[in-house]
Image (spheres, grey):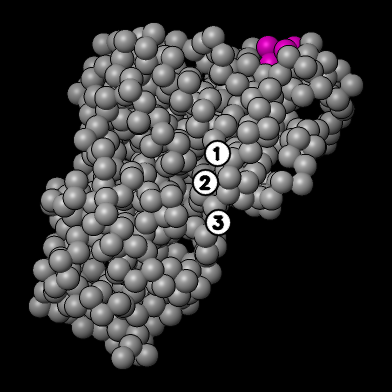
C-alpha cells in the first residue's frame, strides 16, 4: 500500500510510505529555494514539487492520502475551547475585530475561522494534486493532527518498543504539544498542551526581542545563550508567565501577565508583555535566561511523565527539540535511559509522520527504524557531468576520491561535498555538506565569513564511530540519535585538544556519529583523514550560503561552491579544484 503524506505549512513537505516503510521524502524549500517554504502563502504553493518527486520514486498508484492537518470539524471544536479560555481569562478588551480574506470578523466569529481556513488549505492541496494526475476525490483521505504527525514521525522511526513519546513546538492545529504511549503499534494520547501555554511561543518572542527572526532563528538563541549568564529574577518572571506544575502546563494566574489571546501567536500584546519583563538586559543574558527557563520547565515536564508512566526510553519531536542543548539536559535526567530525536524534528517531518501514522492505523507493520536520513533526490553521473561542462569547470575523476580529499583536508582546505541522495531535515549529514578540519579554531572566522554566517554560531563535528567514546562523555543511551546530529555532549579532553574548532564555549559539541552502515563513503573519507592526522573528527556544516536552503541539485552545488569561494567541490566521483588553490 502506497500512502502519500503531505504538509503544506511552514517548511512544507511530502513523503511516500509503502507497506509501513519510508521510501522518499523531501522539503519543498529544496526545490523552490525559498527558506522554510510555507505552502499556505498565496504567493507560494503547497508541496507540489515534493509530491512529484515522491510519485516518481513510487512509480505506481497512490492508495491513500495522509494530510498532516487536523480534521476541520475537530479543529473547530478545539478553536472554540481555546477562544473561550482566553476570553474568560480577561482578554475581552484585547480581542479585536480582524479582517481575514476580505471578511471583517468580530471577536466571536474569529474562533470559527480555523475550520474555514483548514478546508481552504485542503482544497488548494487537492487542486495541485490534480495537476499531477491524482484525483483526491477518488482516493481514501485521512487527517492526522499536527502533533500526532510529530509523534508518529519519532515513534515509528525509533528503535524503542515502549517509549514515552513527547512533542513540543510553538503551535500546530491549536496545540503546542502532546504526551503519548504506544499500544500494539498504535499511539495513545495521554495529555495535550493547549497552544496558549506554549513554551515554544515564549522562546520565539525572545528570539524576536534579541533581534532575530522568530520561527526561524531560535537556534541562534541557543548558541548565544552560552555567552551570557542566566538572570534569576528574569527566570522567575518567565516562570510566572508559564510553567509546568502538577502534571500540566499553566499560564500566569495574574491575567495581566498571561500570554494570549486566541487566535494570535506572536501578537503585539504578547511581545510587549515580555519586553516589559526583560527591560534593559543584554541579549546574551536574555538568551541564557530563556534557555535556562526552558530547560528547567521541560525537564520537569518530561521527568514527571517518565515517572508516572514507568518509562525510561524517550522519543521526541517538534520544533522545541531542535534545541540540541535542551536535548542534552533532558537526556541527563536520571529517569532517562535512552533518547531519540527525529532527524526532521520540526515541521519538515510532518509529511513522514502523517503517512506513517495512517499506514500503522490500517495495518500492523514492523517499525521503520532509520539507518540514515537520505530519502531525497539522487542525481546520475551524466547529470553531474552535464552541470560541470555547462559551467565550464575543470574536473577530474580520482582513482580513490577519499584519499585525495583527505590530503586536501589535512592541508586545511574546505571541501564542498555533493554525494548520493539528499538528506531530509535541518541538518546536513554528509551528502550535502561543507567539510574541513577542526584542529584550527581560526577556521571558524574564515569559514563563517565565506558563508556569511553569524560568528557566534558553533560548527558541528562528524566523528568516526570507532572513536566516539574517546571524544564525548555519557553517550551510551544517545548513540543512536547522535547519528542525526540532534543532541550535544560534553567533550573529552582529547576532543578539546584535537578539534577545538567544533567545541563550543561551554565545552560541548553537537556531533554526528559516522559508521560504515549509515554513510559508507563519508566513513571512508574520515578513515583516510584519520590515517593522515590521527584525528577522528572534522567540521561538518550545511552546504549552502547563509539563509538559503541546503543545495539540492548539481547546478545549485556549483553555484554555492563558486559564490562561497570554497577550495574544492566533490560532485559524486568528480573533483573540482578552486583556481586559487595553492
In 3D space, how far apart are the residues under numbered discs 1 and 3 (Cα atoms)?
Answer: 29 Å
Q: Secondary structure at mark 1?
A: helix
The answer to whether mark 1 and mark 3 are in CB contact below 8 A is no
Q: Which residues are magenta?
A: 80-85
Disc 3 or 2, which lies upstream in sequence?
3
The answer to the question of whether label 2 and label 1 lie on touching residues, with beta carbons closer than 8 A, is: yes
Q: What residue is disc 1 on?
A: 291
Name the residue carrying label 2. Answer: 222
Q: CA distance from mark 2 to mark 1?
A: 7 Å
Residue at the limit of the structure toward the right, as seen here: 93
* Residue 94 located within the stretch drawn in magenta: no
The residue pinned by badge 3 equals: 34
What secondary structure is marked by label 3? loop
Q: Which residue is depicted at the point 39% across and 82% down?
A: 391
Name the image quarter holding the C terminus. bottom left
Of 307 and 259, which appears nearest the observer? 307
Amino acid at each position: 500500500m502506497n500512502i502519500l503524506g503531505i504538509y503544506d505549512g511552514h517548511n512544507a513537505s511530502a513523503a511516500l510510505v509503502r507497506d509501513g516503510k519510508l521510501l522518499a521524502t523531501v522539503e519543498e524549500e529544496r526545490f523552490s529555494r525559498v527558506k522554510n517554504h510555507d505552502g499556505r502563502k498565496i504567493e507560494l504553493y503547497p508541496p507540489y514539487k515534493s509530491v512529484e518527486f515522491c510519485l516518481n520514486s513510487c512509480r505506481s498508484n497512490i492508495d491513500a492520502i495522509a494530510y498532516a492537518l487536523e480534521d476541520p470539524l475537530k479543529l473547530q471544536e478545539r478553536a472554540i475551547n481555546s477562544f473561550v479560555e482566553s476570553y474568560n481569562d480577561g482578554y475581552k478588551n484585547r480581542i479585536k475585530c480582524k479582517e481575514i480574506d476580505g471578511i471583517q470578523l468580530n471577536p466571536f466569529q474569529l474562533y470559527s475561522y480555523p475550520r474555514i481556513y483548514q478546508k481552504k488549505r485542503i482544497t488548494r492541496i487537492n487542486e495541485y494534486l490534480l495537476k499531477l494526475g491524482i484525483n483526491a476525490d477518488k482516493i481514501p483521505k485521512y487527517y492526522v493532527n499536527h502533533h500526532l504527525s510529530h509523534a508518529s514521525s519519532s515513534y515509528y522511526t525509533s528503535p524503542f518498543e515502549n517509549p514515552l513519546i513527547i512533542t513540543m513546538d510553538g503551535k500546530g492545529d491549536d496545540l503546542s504539544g502532546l504526551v503519548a504511549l504506544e499500544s500494539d503499534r498504535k499511539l495513545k494520547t495521554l495529555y495535550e498542551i493547549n497552544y496558549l501555554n506554549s513554551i515554544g511561543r515564549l522562546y520565539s518572542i525572545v528570539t524576536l526581542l534579541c533581534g532575530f527572526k522568530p520561527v526561524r532563528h531560535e537556534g541562534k538563541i541557543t548558541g548565544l545563550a552560552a555567552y551570557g549568564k542566566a538572570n534569576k529574577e528574569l527566570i522567575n518572571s518567565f516562570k510566572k508567565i508559564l510553567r509546568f506544575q502538577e502534571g500540566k502546563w499553566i499560564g500566569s494566574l495574574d491575567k495581566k501577565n498571561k500570554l494570549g489571546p486566541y487566535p494570535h501567536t506572536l501578537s503585539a500584546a504578547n511581545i510587549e508583555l515580555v519586553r516589559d519583563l526583560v527591560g534593559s538586559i543584554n541579549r546574551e543574558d536574555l538568551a541564557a535566561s530563556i534557555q535556562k527557563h526552558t530547560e528547567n520547565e521541560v525537564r520537569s515536564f518530561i521527568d514527571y511523565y517518565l515517572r508516572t508512566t514507568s518509562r525510561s526510553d524517550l522519543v521526541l519531536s517538534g520544533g522545541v527539540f531542535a534545541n540540541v542543548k535542551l536535548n542534552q539536559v533532558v537526556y541527563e535526567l536520571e529517569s532517562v535511559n535512552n533518547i531519540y530525536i527525529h532527524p526532521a524534528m520540526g515541521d519538515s517531518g510532518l509529511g513522514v509522520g502523517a503517512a506513517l501514522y495512517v499506514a500503522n492505523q490500517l495495518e500492523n507493520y514492523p517499525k521503520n527504524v532509520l539507518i540514515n536520513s537520505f530519502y531525497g533526490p539522487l542525481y546520475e553521473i551524466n547529470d553531474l557531468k552535464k552541470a560541470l561542462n555547462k559551467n565550464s569547470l575543470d574536473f577530474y575523476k580520482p582513482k580513490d576520491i577519499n584519499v585525495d580529499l583527505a590530503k586536501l583536508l589535512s592541508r586545511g582546505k574546505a571541501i564542498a561535498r555533493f554525494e548520493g541522495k539528499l538528506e531530509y531535515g535541518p541538518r546536513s549529514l554528509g551528502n550535502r555538506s561543507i567539510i574541513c578540519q577542526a584542529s584550527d579554531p581560526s577556521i571558524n572566522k574564515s569559514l563563517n565569513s565565506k558563508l556569511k554566517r553569524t560568528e557566534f554560531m558553533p560548527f558541528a563535528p562528524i566523528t568516526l564511530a570507532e572513536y566516539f567514546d574517546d571524544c564525548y562523555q555519557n553517550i551510551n543511551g544517545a548513540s543512536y540519535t547522535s547519528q542525526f546530529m540532534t543532541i550535544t555532549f560534553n567533550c573529552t579532553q582529547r576532543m578539546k585538544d584535537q578539534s577545538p574548532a567544533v567545541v563550543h564555549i561551554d565545552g560541548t559539541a553537537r556531533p554526528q556519529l559516522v559508521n560504515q552502515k549509515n554513510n559508507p563513503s563519508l566513513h571512508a573519507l574520515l578513515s583516510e583523514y584519520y590515517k593522515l592526522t590521527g584525528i577522528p573528527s572534522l567540521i561538518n556544516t550545511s552546504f549552502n550560503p547563509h539563509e538559503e536552503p541546503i543545495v539540492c541539485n548539481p547546478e545549485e552545488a556549483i553555484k554555492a561552491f563558486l559564490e562561497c569561494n570554497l577550495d574544492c567541490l566533490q560532485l559524486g566521483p568528480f573533483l573540482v579544484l578552486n583556481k586559487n588553490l595553492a
